[in-house]
Amino acid sequence: MTPPEASKSNTPVAVDTPPAGISRLVILKKRSDFLRTARAGHVPMPGFVLQFRARGDEAPLRVGFTCSKKVGNAVARNRAKRRLRAIAQDVLLKIGKAGTDYVLIGRFERTAQRPYLDLVADLEKALERAG
């Protein structure tokens, strides 16, 4: 069996290029990073709490997600964190500040049940307040 013929042109194939700047979120994983962020500022919102800490470098922004057992069982916590990841992907990549750590904390029965567009608006407002 012979392989299919490759295209003869030397033009590169168009690939979806990410927007200028950050293309993916860098996730916080170490407990020490979460604790440092918890000691800095926070902004309570109806759907979640945003904690933030300026690191003072020009590295990409980092984000962490957490939900306590007060939010519910594992299914409820995971659903809340999925929603937080989605709004962070939509909003933080556009208006988040480089060199800053953000932690989004889910709230009992609010994060999972609040309409998505309201969560997005909450995060935009929280980032304005965080300065």
Image: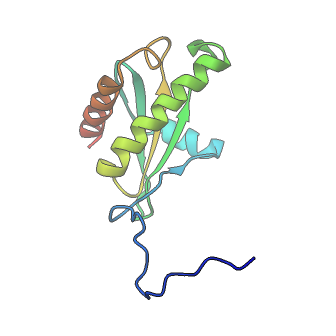
The one of 12 and 31 positioned closer to us in this rendering = 12
The quadrant of the image that shows the C terminus is: top left
The quadrant of the image that shows the N terminus is: bottom right
Rendering coords of residue 65 (x, y %): 53, 35
* Residue at 47%, 18% in the rendered image: 112
> Which colour scheme appears in the figure?
rainbow
Q: Quadrant of residue 70?
A: top right
The one of 106 and 89 positioned closer to us in this rendering = 89
Q: Is residue 131 left or right of residue 34?
A: left
The one of 48 and 40 positioned closer to us in this rendering = 48
* Residue at 42%, 63% in the rendered image: 57
* Residue at 40%, 63% in the rendered image: 16
* Residue at 36%, 42% in the rendered image: 90
Q: Is residue 115 left or right of residue 59?
A: left
Vertical arrangement, residue 92 with respect to residue 10, above or below: above
Rendering coords of residue 82 (x, y %): 52, 31
